[in-house]
């Protein structure tokens, strides 16, 4: 099981997967906007999206869990 964390504080502008989706290492699963820059959030392991803990428009803190990959 892997947790995908926010690398920095910002706002979720897109969630590109849904629960049950298969993902592979380096797939883009979300996008966060911070300091007027868009930051793609990538997976670092293969698996299936088990849980998504954020939605588009949510504000997140650094190291906050965005989703869980199983």
Image: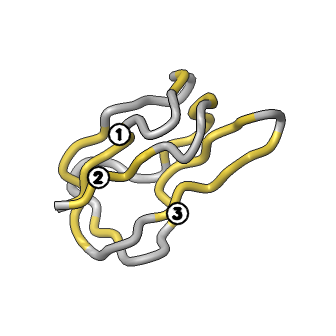
Q: Are marks 2 and 1 in contact (CB under 8 Å)?
A: yes
Tell me which residue sits at (18%, 51%) in the image.
Answer: 50
Tell me which residue sits at (55%, 47%) in the image.
Answer: 7
In the rendered structure, the answer to whether residue 68 lies left or right of residue 44 reads: left
In percent of width and height, residue 52 lies at: 30, 40
When asked about the image quadrant of residue 51, the answer is top left
* Mark 3 surroundings within 10 Å by alpha-carbon count, few (fewer than 14), some (14 through 19), many (20 or more): some
* Mark 1 surroundings within 10 Å by alpha-carbon count, few (fewer than 14), some (14 through 19), many (20 or more): some
**Distance of label 2 from label 1 (alpha carbons):** 6 Å
Q: Residue furthest right?
A: 36
In percent of width and height, residue 61 lies at: 51, 28
**Distance of label 2 from label 3 (alpha carbons):** 14 Å
- Total labels: the figure holds 3
Q: Are marks 3 and 1 in contact (CB under 8 Å)?
A: no
SS of the residue at dot 2? strand
Query: Upstream in the sequence, badge 2 or badge 1?
Result: 2
In the rendered structure, the answer to whether residue 23 lies left or right of residue 38 reads: left
Query: Upstream in the sequence, badge 2 or badge 3?
Result: 2
Q: Which residue is mark 3?
A: 28
In the rendered structure, the answer to whether residue 70 lies left or right of residue 61 reads: left
* Mark 2 surroundings within 10 Å by alpha-carbon count, few (fewer than 14), some (14 through 19), many (20 or more): some
Tell me which residue sits at (57%, 33%) in the image.
Answer: 12
SS of the residue at dot 1? strand
When asked about the image quadrant of residue 65, the answer is top left
In percent of width and height, residue 54 lies at: 40, 31
Q: Which residue is mark 1?
A: 65
Query: Upstream in the sequence, badge 3 or badge 1?
Result: 3
When asked about the image quadrant of residue 9, the answer is top right
SS of the residue at dot 3? strand
Q: Which residue is mark 2?
A: 3
């Amino acid at each position: 099981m892997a947790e995908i964390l926010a690398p920095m504080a910002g706002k979720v502008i897109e969630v590109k997967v849904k629960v049950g989706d298969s993902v592979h290492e380096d797939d883009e699963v979300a996008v966060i906007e911070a300091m007027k820059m868009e930051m793609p959030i990538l997976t670092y392991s293969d698996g299936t999206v088990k849980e998504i803990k954020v939605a588009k428009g949510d504000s997140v803190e650094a190291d906050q869990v965005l989703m869980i990959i199983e």
